[in-house]
Amino acid sequence: MSTQWMQIAVVGTILTIGGPVLGAAQSSQTKTDTYTWNGEFVSLDTTAKTMTVKSRVAYQEAISELKHLKAGDRVWIVWSGIHDSSDAVRQVRRSETGRKIDETLVLPAELVSTEAPNQYITIRVKVPESGLSAINTVKPGEWVTVTSRHRPSIDDEAVVAVRPYGARTTTE
């Protein structure tokens, strides 16, 4: 009988000590407040600190939504993908004034244009100072990798980094 109690005590101790350690390790691997997406570089406005980029639209829902929007509209780009990376636009919503973004993979932007049959969308986003210098040699038609924040509190904080596609940095 005492052997059973000893085994229960050992298992209980292991779970008590090991459970939080395992949970913390899993949490640190999966929790991040940013995600990356790629797009074709169109232009850079260093004065306004904005970048214009073209991205692929992957879902019919987004294509349908574009019919109700025009150039210059403030929009929320909802990306497809997983928690920390995306490869295409899943949805385009009209920006909701006064409402905070409470979802992941959502980017506030300005709609610049769409290409028939709306397979691509061109958007303009604010870029941090470090991003401006990182892409000042990128030419139109080349690709960039953009790191954006999940649930940005203001538009100016949505993009945290930009780099030429394929370039690696140690600051991310």
Image (cartoon, rainbow, N blue to C red):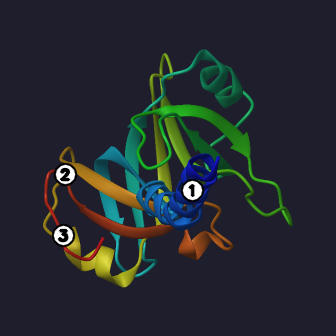
Q: CA distance from mark 1 to mark 2?
A: 58 Å
Considering only order in the chain, which callout, 1 or 3, is on the residue closer to the N terminus? 1
What residue is shown at x 31% (from left), y 58% (from top)?
Answer: 43
**Quadrant location of residue 15?**
bottom right
Badge 3 amino acid = Thr
- In this figure, which residue is indicated by the disc labeled 2? 165
Q: Nearer the viewer, mark 1 or mark 2?
A: 1
Q: Secondary structure at mark 3?
A: loop
Crowding at label 3, few (<14), some or many (≥20) Cα neighbours within 10 Å?
A: few
Crowding at label 2, few (<14), some or many (≥20) Cα neighbours within 10 Å?
A: some
x and y percentages locating residue 125 in the rendered image: 49, 62
Badge 1 amino acid = Met
Q: Nearer the viewer, mark 3 or mark 1?
A: 1
Instruction: Tell me if residue 34 comes above or below residue 79 in the rendering.
Output: below
x and y percentages locating residue 35 in the rendered image: 44, 54
Q: CA distance from mark 3 to mark 2?
A: 11 Å
Judge by depth and name the residue closer to the eye, 159 or 23: 23
x and y percentages locating residue 46 in the rendered image: 35, 78
Q: Taking the image as drawn, is residue 62 in sight?
A: yes
From this viewpoint, which residue is outermost toward the right?
98
- In this figure, which residue is indicated by the disc labeled 3? 169
Instruction: Tell me if residue 120 comes above or below residue 7 in the rendering.
Output: above
Judge by depth and name the residue closer to the eye, 42 or 103: 103
What residue is shown at x 30% (from left), y 76% (from top)?
Answer: 132
Badge 2 amino acid = Tyr
